[in-house]
Image (spheres, helix red, strand yellow):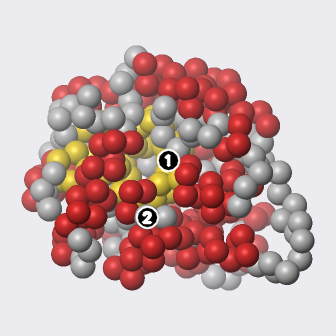
Amino acid sequence: MQGKIALEEHFAIAETLEDSHGYFPERVWQEVKSRVLDIQERRVAEMDRHGIEMMLLSLNAPAVQAIPDPARAAAIARRANDFLAEQVAKRPDRFQGLAALALQDADGATRELERCVKDLGFRGALVNGFSQVGNAETAAYYDLPQYRPFWAMAEKLEAPFYLHPRNPLPRDARIYQGHPWLLGPIWAFGHETAVHALRLMASGLFDAHPRLQIILGHMGENLPFAMWRVDNANAWIENRHGWPAKKRLSDYFHENFYITTSGNFHTPALLNAMLEIGADRIMFSTDWPFENVDHAAIWFDACPISENDRRKIGRDNARRLFRLGN
Ligand code: MN
C-alpha cells in the first residue's frame, strides 16, 4: 500500500541516545545508534521503499521520563522538541512531530504541550510511561489528581497522547528477577503500559474529559485480548468493580483509545484487535529504528483484511485523528 502513515517512529538527541543502548547487545548497538540518530537520509529511503508517506516522530525511551530532576527533564524535553521542529521543517510533507513532555512537573508539561502544538505545529505528544520525580525510586502515573489540568489542556488542544512503554522501576520488577529477558519489549513493556492504561480508564479521567484520545502501541499492549475479562470477571457479584469511573472500562477503551501495529506484525493479533476495538481505531506503525520498516510494511501490505480496512488502518485513521489533511 502506498501513502501509509506511521506514528510510533523514534529519534534520539545526544542527551537521550544512551537510553536506547541498554536494550541492545554491543554487536548491534552501532547499527541501532546510526538508525536512531538519522532522520533525513536512511529513514526517508526506508519510507520510500515501503510506501510510507509520512512518519510522526517522537523521542526515544525512557529519555525525559527517567530524569528525576524536573528542571533538567524539562530542559531536555524542550531541546528535543526544538530539534524535532527543525527536522520537520525540512520535510513537512514526510515528517510531523509528537512532543516529548516532562511530566515530572504537570504545570510545566501543560505549558510545553501548548507551545509544541500552537508554536511548533506538533500533532500531539508521546510520553514514555510514568515519570520519575525527585528521585529515581518515585514513579508518578498520570491518573493522579495533579495531572487533571494537563489532561484538560490536551483535550482542549485536541492533542492525542501516545502512551509509550518503559520498563517498571526495579522495586516493581521483582517478578522478573533472574529472568532479565522478560524486561523490555518481550514482556515487561506491554504489562507496564497496559496497567497504566487501565489506571487511566478506571480513574474517571475520561468521564471528566470525554474527548481525550490516548494511543497505545504494539497492538494495544495485549488489552484487546483482555478487556472482556476486565469487565466481566465474577459477573455474578453485584457492584464488584470498585473503580471510580462511571462506565465499563471497555467503554473507555472503545471511545478514548486508539492502538497501533508497532512491533506486532501478526495477523491473528490484528484480527482480534479489529473485532475488539474496530478498524476505525487501529493505525499502522513500525517502531523504527527498533523494529524494521520492511517487517512492518511487507506484513501489513499483504495481510488478509479488506482493502477498505487496509486504507483506514494504513492511512485514513491517522489523517483524521491528527488532522493531517489541513
Ligand atoms: Mn517504540
Which residue: 10% across, 53% down? 48
Which residue: 33% across, 27% down? 85
188 shown above or below 288: below
Q: Horizontal and vertical percent for residue 13? A: 39, 39
240 shown above or below 16: below
26 shown above or below 20: below
Which residue: 23% across, 71% down? 306
Looking at numbered disc 2 in the image, what kind of residue is underneath it?
A: Gly
- Label 2: few (<14), some (14–19) or many (≥20) C-alpha neighbours in 10 Å: some
Q: Which residue is mark 2?
A: 278
Regarding residue 203, the answer to whether it shows in the image is: yes
Q: Horizontal and vertical percent for residue 286? A: 32, 61
Q: Residue 162: which numbered mark, if any? A: 1
Q: Residue 217: which numbered mark, if any? A: none
Labels 2 and 1: the sequence-earlier one: 1
Q: Horizontal and vertical percent for residue 172? A: 76, 65
| 285 relative to 142 in the view: left or right | left
What SS does tag 1 mark?
A: strand
Q: Horizontal and vertical percent for residue 116? A: 44, 25
For ligand 1, tell me if the residue under mark 2 lies within 8 Å: no
